[in-house]
Structures are given as C-alpha cells and as structure tokens.
Image: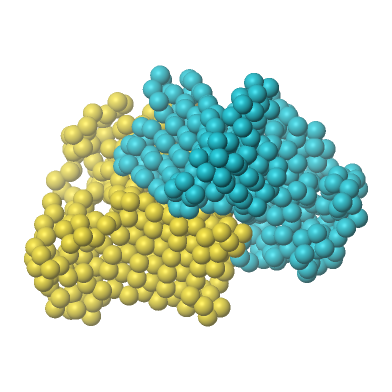
Chain colours: A cyan, B yellow
C-alpha cells in the first residue's frame, strides 16, 4: 500500500508543528507545503524544521494550485481562525477531491457562527466525495469534546462547568498580540472598542457542540473579556508584561437552556501564571447523576495539543463518510504509534 | 416517527438501572423485559422499579422468544460477564435482526479473550444487518476509552498508567461475593486455588483496546490479585468485613511493548475505603509529548456509570454500520437530554 499523501497549507507555528509530527510517523508523506512567507520560499522543510525527512524532500511553495494533485489524500489547512476566511481555500481543496483538516477555531463547530457556510461546505464535500473536519485542543477537545465524552457516563446532566487556566508562555509573537500580552489597560480598552483584540476564539463553537451533542437548545449565549493585569513584571520567550499592564486576557462565557444556566466557561490565558500563584489546569465539573469532577493539571499544552489533534484525526477523516464532520461525529481521537496506513479501512 | 423499541434481557442491578434510566428518556419504549427470577414473573416493571412508565406498561417474562419481535430495535443484554456465556444469547438476538448492547465485561473488547467468537459475532451481525456493542464504565470507559481519548491530544505516547480506586459500598450482594468482601485470608487463598474468585474482569479487554487503538503490539500481559485486608471492622449496605478479613481485592496488570513496560493498571476495589484513609478516584497518567495527568475524584460511580454508558450508546449503535463494534469504532459517548429519536440518522 502506498503512503498517505498530505499537503500542509500554512507553515506558521501550527503548520510547522504538524509537519514536524508527520515526519516522525510511519506511512505518511508530506507531498507539499504552501506558505506565502518569502523567507521560506523554495526552502526544504527539513531545513526549516531542522529535522531529517525519512522519505523524499519537500520544498515550500507559494503556488497551492500545483500542490493539489490527484494523489493527495488530505490537506492540513493551518492559515486562519475564522470559517469565512478559510472558506475559499476549503472550497478550492474540496473541488480537487481532497479531504481537509482545518486548524481554524471556528471550523471546530462551524454551525455555531456560520450555519450557511457550513451547509455549503457539507454539500461541496459530499459532491466531491471527501470529508472536512476542524479540530484543535480548544475548541475541539478540552472545553467541548472531553466534557461531552465524560457526560457519556452520566444518567442525566444538570449543568456543565469548564475551566481552562493556561499559560501563554510557550507561544509565539502572533499569540502574544492576539491575547494582548504586554499592552496597557488603556490600549486594551481601545482595542476592545475597535474590535481588534481576538482573545479566545471558540466559546461559541464549544457551547454549541456540547448542546447539539446532548440534545438541548441554547436560548441565550453570552461571553465577556477582561484584562489580567499583572502586579509584577513578567517575561516569557516571546512576551513581556510590565507591572500594571496585561499579562493576558480572562474570557468567560455562559449559556442557558430553558432559562436556566447550563454551561459555564472560564478561560483565563496569560504568560507566566505561576509568578502570581495561579495553578494552571483543565477542569470539567459535570453536575447530575452521578457528579463528575475532572482535573488535568497542568493544562494540556495548547500548541502541541492542537498539532496532535490534527494529525491524530488523519485516519478518521480518510475513513469517514463524505461531508462536513465535527469531533462528535467521528470515533474518539487517539495517538498514533504504528503505521498510519494500517488504520485506513 | 415511532418510538425506539427496546428489550432488556436480565433484570438484575444493571438491567433494572437501564430500565429506570430509559423510563426517564423521551422517544424510547421498553417493549419487554426477560428475567428468570421467579419473584419478578408477571410483575410490571413500574412496580419493581417503583417508577411510573410514561408509555404502556411492561411486564417481566421468562420467555425471550416472545419478546424478540420484528419491531424491536435493540436488546440490552445484562446477563453475563463473559463472552462465551453471552454468545448463544447474542446469536439468538442477532438472528432476529435486532441490535445488541451487552454489559458483559469481556464484550467491551471481545477480541482480547475470544478472537474466534468475536469473528463469529461480527459475521453474524453483518449477515443480519445489525450491530453489537459491549460497553460499561470499566471496561468500556475509565481504564481504556478515556485514556485513549486523552492520548489524542498527544504527539507521542511513551507509557500509560491508569488507576481506578473505587468504593464497592453502593453495590449489591453479587458484587460482594465476586469481590470477596468479608472473606478470610484463608478463604481468599482457597478461592484463588479453585479459580472461583472473579475480582475485576476487564484488564485484558482494556489493555488490548488501548493497544489496538494506538497501533502497538502487546508482547506480554500479566495480572495479579491481592487481598485488601481491613484493620478495622467495615460495613456497607450489602457487605461486611470484620477486622483481619477482606474489605475487597486489589488487582493490578501490566503490558509490555517491544520488551518495555507500556501499560500499567491498578484497580483496588473495597467497601468503605475512606475508613482507612483511602481517597477514591480515577487517575490516568500519560507520559509522552506532552505529559497528561488526569484525575477524577471521587471515582465515577460504577453502577450508574455502566447503566449510563449502555443507554447513552443506544443511538450510536442504531446508527452504526452492521457488525461487532467496540467503543473505539463509534463516536464519543454523550448524555442524552433530548428525544432519542432525533439522534437517529
């Protein structure tokens, strides 16, 4: 059996992580990488990743059209956070009869924010006999799929509380900017006004994934963004926050069902949380019959987690029936220790 | 759309729990219950469960043949722990073109102990165009599926440690006997010799489910059983252990891959563990990239958990392609809050 052939579109932190992970796996070949960054153009991925390739060498190209050939099984699309921005790229891939795994946060449950585009993507995928999946650590796993999975051991669920308290220290400059690390309170307020502070993208996706999985209808969804102001100077590899400025952002969300609180989410993200005594972790508290209180401490590392989720879902996406899928449609994710080809049905 | 019709075969603690849970759900009718216990014969399930039925009343029958009618969608089979003993019943159900959800521990991953019977069951199910699933809290969830799911967020896994430290206090007389609660050390040794002490059934199933999910080959599997001797008198609703006798059994298992330890399982079960300071909980420690340490404390209650897993998998089993399935083949379990019929594709 031939190796699984994949293309990586977008060679930033996530795309590179996916590439690096794939180089360690058996039965898969990175056929092409597309990125517009001029410093990568024409370079081999081994040289960029500083890691040898067991199979043939791959070079970064700007021309996606040349890479979407008939022997490609899956494209990892790691270019955007939003469904609307990913849509033309997804369409282009699907029309070449190639499966898509997207890192875009909204694509983890695109029905939440883009029901019309979701319908289009589903129809396009079915028409071209391929599958589309959005995944990642959050949304895609910690604050949705894991809570859903745990609820499977419950006779009834009354309420769901999920907290992800994580460190931004391992992340790069893009994340520092998106999460407002180092900015002043005044700048925070200005960026809120101009709607230019991303914060966490994914609460709505997580909440609607949970609601649809459990079969309840959300009648109200709300989310808030607050600054995490540091009282000491903090510094990480790519971020710096002086005393009095933002170490990160505290985001919260709530959803009600039949007028009662049903889902409560808390997701404070900051650099160097331990410097002021914050214990990081992932916490899921399900009230019902029976109660379940889960804790993962420290939190599952976000960058590695997203990379792993994307690569580990590769066989499930190839095996799936055609259409737009989400994590609740497919078998549980799992690490891949053996030859990926053996997992294809 | 008509209600989903189910039959419960075996109306002990698990069968009754499944019945009680189903009575609370929308879109499902318990068409029949089969049990050989003469005290239940001809009685209504509402009177046994002390719970009203929203739909028509169901009476316990001894004659399974009469219950396996063409309008039945799923039989919950809650009669045995072992595949071999369940096999004739599973065969009988499948031959009537009815799906099966089994509580038998070995059926959670029958390939581990009964590869030939598994093949037969799979072929029978495909021939009759229906699906068979074994599930439960353990095996079926805590010590296997949950560890597998968490590994999905990992780039690589080096080793897996799972501990389930639980209380037997909520369980009935059958479990007290199976777990040796109250017996002397001498009796424990005699029952070990005569192979009449069940202990936990499921380590082999959990270990092979994990190994197959991750794509590794187990080269050695071993398990041990030790008495948990109480140093104080202990008493639960259905169990009693005098000082010096067994409060329960401590079971452990190990599996190696390529000669190295890969899976390590610890499962001490006893009545009233807190009386001697034992904190109960479910613990999963995955070493690799990244490490993941999960804790659920107290442990997910075993009886309710098994009941919930069986009922919550109902729509997945109806939706599945024909054949013998395990928890790693189907979408993630989830609690059912709405009408079950809406979950059928």
Residue located 64% across and 28% down the image: A187
Q: Residue at x 70, y 65 (%)?
A: A24
Question: For this rendering, which residue is in front, A251 or B148?
Answer: A251
Quadrant in the picture for the C terminus of chain A: bottom right
A92 is higher (above) or lower (below) than A318: above
For residue A82, what is the image quadrant?
top right
The answer to whether residue A301 is left or right of residue A134 is: left
Residue drawn at x 77%, y 64% as measured from the top left = A50
Q: Whole-percent x and y of residue B152?
A: 56, 54
Foreground residue, A243 or B40?
A243
In the image, residue A315 above or below residue A257: below
User: Can you give x and y, in whole percent of width and height, for residue A218 in the image?
Assistant: 48, 24
Q: Is residue B281 visible?
A: yes
Q: How many dots with numbers?
A: 0
Residue A128 appears at what percent x and percent y?
78, 39
Residue depicted at 37% across the width and 62% down the height: B163
Provide residue B78's location: percent of width, then percent of height: 32, 51
Residue A54 lies left or right of residue B221; in this view the side is: right
Q: Residue B334: tell me if it is visible.
A: no
């Amino acid at each position: 059996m031939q190796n699984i052939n994949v293309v990586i579109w977008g060679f930033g932190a996530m795309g590179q992580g996916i590439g690096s992970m794939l180089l360690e796996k058996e039965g898969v070949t990175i056929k092409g990488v597309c990125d517009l960054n001029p410093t990568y153009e024409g370079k081999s991925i081994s040289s960029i990743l500083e890691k040898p390739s067991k199979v043939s060498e791959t070079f970064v190209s700007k021309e996606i059209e040349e890479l979407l050939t008939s022997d490609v099984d899956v494209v990892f699309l790691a270019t955007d956070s939003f469904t609307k921005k990913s849509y033309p790229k997804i369409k282009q891939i699907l029309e070449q009869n190639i499966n898509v795994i997207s890192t875009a946060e909204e694509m983890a449950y695109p029905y939440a924010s883009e029901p019309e585009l979701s319908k289009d993507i589903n129809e396009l995928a079915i028409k071209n006999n391929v599958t589309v999946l959005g995944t990642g650590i959050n949304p895609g796993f910690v604050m949705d799929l894991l809570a859903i999975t745990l609820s499977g051991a419950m006779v009834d669920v009354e309420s769901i509380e999920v907290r992800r308290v994580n460190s931004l220290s391992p992340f790069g400059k893009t994340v520092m900017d998106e999460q407002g690390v180092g900015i002043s309170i005044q700048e925070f307020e200005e960026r809120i006004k101009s709607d230019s502070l991303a914060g966490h993208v994914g609460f709505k996706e997580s909440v609607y994934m949970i609601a649809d999985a459990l079969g309840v209808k959300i009648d109200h969804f709300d989310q808030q963004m607050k600054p995490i102001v540091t009282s000491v100077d903090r510094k990480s590899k790519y971020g710096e926050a002086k005393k009095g400025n933002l170490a990160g952002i505290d985001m919260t969300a709530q959803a009600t069902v039949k007028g009662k609180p049903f889902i409560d989410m808390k997701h404070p993200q900051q650099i160097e949380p331990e410097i002021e005594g914050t214990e990081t972790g992932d916490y899921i508290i399900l009230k019902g019959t029976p109660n379940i209180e889960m804790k993962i401490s420290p939190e599952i590392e976000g960058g590695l987690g997203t990379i792993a989720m994307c690569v580990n879902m590769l066989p499930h996406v190839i095996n799936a029936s055609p259409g737009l899928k989400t994590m609740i449609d497919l078998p549980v994710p799992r690490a891949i220790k053996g030859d990926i080809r053996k997992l294809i049905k």
